[in-house]
Image: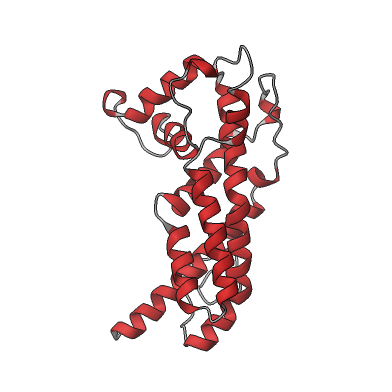
Amino acid sequence: MSDEQLQKQTDSNVLAHFIDVVGLIQRSTWRKHKLKVGISVPTESDLPSHEAFVFAVVYFRQLFSDKLLGRAKNTYGKLSQFPDRVSTVNSKYQSAIAAWDSPPQGLKIASHLPGSGISTLDKLPTLSELFECFTYGAHVLHSRAPKSNPAAARLTELLKAIHPHTLLGFLHGGFLEVYGPISAIGARVHQDFNELQRQHGLPAPEVYWQNQLFNSTGSSSASDSR
């Protein structure tokens, strides 16, 4: 395979996998759960289930830690012939990154409420930091020794000031904030994908459509429709 062919295959794979990940989040029980977070500590039924949470963090990790979101944005910007669409995608990307690198809105609002306990924190955690705390600090994805795990130490500090369910509520609310612009990018890329394939001679993506791979007895080849 020539360098040009390899690049075209990579471009096709990146866009297709991004479309798949955004769709998996959109159709998930996590996304469909009606989050309820207010002044009082949320109950278990107010929050997505543990299983739904783990499902969500697996794919948010791909979008941010594995930089799938940024690669998809760059690939689309390189291939699209519509400057206005590229501009919109770039703007949505910046919104997602800004939300990821900021404290969730619910946490910022609650920090001003008297008696919340949040005011005792020297610094409010960003959504990215909360993600690290619950994903790695709580050993959801990897097992690490607590003494060598800064995320675990930070999670312990946060839980001294904020009830676990309340902190989880802020995390889920932050995920919803950041998913809004990601979903908009996903819709744009999905809508234009076939046209981009035709214009640039992109091959069929070499990805496994996960909904078909795990939830269907039919074929799960990369050439299957989305």
Q: How is the image coloured?
A: secondary structure
Q: Quadrant of residue 172?
A: top right
Q: Quadrant of residue 211?
A: bottom right
Please give the name of the residue rendered at 61% of the width and 68% of the height, measured from the top-left corner. 188
Q: Is residue 159 left or right of residue 25?
A: left
Q: Is residue 168 visible?
A: yes
Q: Relative to 86, is 102 above or below?
A: above
Q: Relative to 93, is 220 above or below?
A: below
Which corner quadrant holds the N terminus? bottom left
Farthest left residue in view: 148
Task: Please state the horizontal and vertical placement of residue 180, each as a whole percent of the image.
Answer: 63, 52
- Residue placed most toward the observer, 220 or 37: 37
Farthest top residue in view: 115
Please give the name of the residue rendered at 70% of the width and 45% of the height, measured from the top-left corner. 32
Q: Is residue 111 left or right of residue 27?
A: left
Q: Is residue 115 left or right of residue 100?
A: right
Task: Please state the horizontal and vertical placement of residue 213, each as a whole percent of the image.
Answer: 54, 62
- Residue placed most toward the observer, 6 or 179: 179
Task: Please state the horizontal and vertical placement of residue 140, each as a whole percent of the image.
Answer: 44, 35
Please give the name of the residue rendered at 64% of the width and 36% of the height, measured from the top-left corner. 48
Q: Relative to 57, is 182 above or below?
A: below
